[in-house]
Amino acid sequence: MVLILYHARITLFQNLVHAVTFMKKLSIKRITPDHDKLVELYKTEKNSRLKERYHALALMHELKSCYKVAKIMKRSDVTIQSWVKSFNTGGLPALVPSASPGRPSRLSMDQKEELKKDVLTHPRKLGCDFSNWKGKNVSEHVKNKFGVLLKVRQCQYLLHELGFTLQRPRYAFPKANRDDQEQFVQEIKKRSTISTQTI
């Protein structure tokens, strides 16, 4: 029993030493892109996961240690090592994260394109009984047209994915006279100037 424990400890120690020496030896082998280019990529990249990987590689150029980079980035050594290995073997394309896990979209690409065309059209022209495309209305439209039930929040995400942003309607007063409004604003400004001077 003691012999088995002793052997297990030696094996564990050997593995640890091997891992540490391997970590020290791991470095960036590729010449391009260089440190400056990686920093530039890091600054301009919009995908947060890819941005983090560019940052890690730029730091690897400077610090030459997976352990130090992992500590700065609050990531595990193994994660930094895997990014360095991927970069060494496949270059920048190997750093692109795979599609995030999760439930696949409930609308096909064709249905999404059709929905995008619908949202670009005024709802009344499509026979809908509402006048703007908010999440609740999109949910109702998707249910009626495609037979797919999506919650309001899912529809809001879907609209964002299709390139739409939330815009509040601005009310216009048809009977208002712009010249009178401008004159009123100017009078208010004059009065406020006079009152501050008298104080």
Image (cartoon, grey):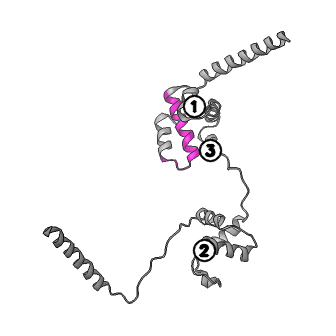
Q: Position of residue 54 (x, y in %)?
A: 54, 39
Q: Give the mark, 2 or 1, whose residue is nearer the N terminus.
A: 1
Confirm whether residue 113 shows in the render: yes
Picture coordinates of residue 184, whole percent (x, y): 26, 81
Q: Residue at x 64, y 37 (%)?
A: 90
For the residues carrying marks 2 and 1, which lies nearer the camera in this image? 1
Give left or right: position of 53 versus 141: left
Point 62% across, 29% down: residue = 77
Mark toward the viewer: 3 or 1 = 1
Task: Locate residue 56, reporting x and y percent.
Answer: 55, 35
User: In which quadrant will I find the C terminus?
Assistant: bottom left
What secondary structure predominates along the stretch shown in magenta? Answer: helix
Q: Residue furthest bottom?
A: 175
In which quarter of the view is residue 121 placed?
A: bottom right
Mark 1: give few (<14), some (14-19) or many (20+) Cα within 10 Å. Answer: some
Secondary structure category for the residue under label 2: helix
Check disc 1 and report the residue beneath it. Answer: 70
Residue 196: x and y in percent read 18, 68
Please report whichever mark, 3 or 1, sits nearer to the chain's N-terminal start. 1
Q: Quadrant of the N terminus?
A: top right
Give the alpha-carbon distance from disc 2 to disc 1, as whole Å. Answer: 45 Å
Three-letter amino acid code of the residue under disc 3: Val
Q: Which residues are magenta?
A: 44-62
Q: Quadrant of residue 51?
A: top right
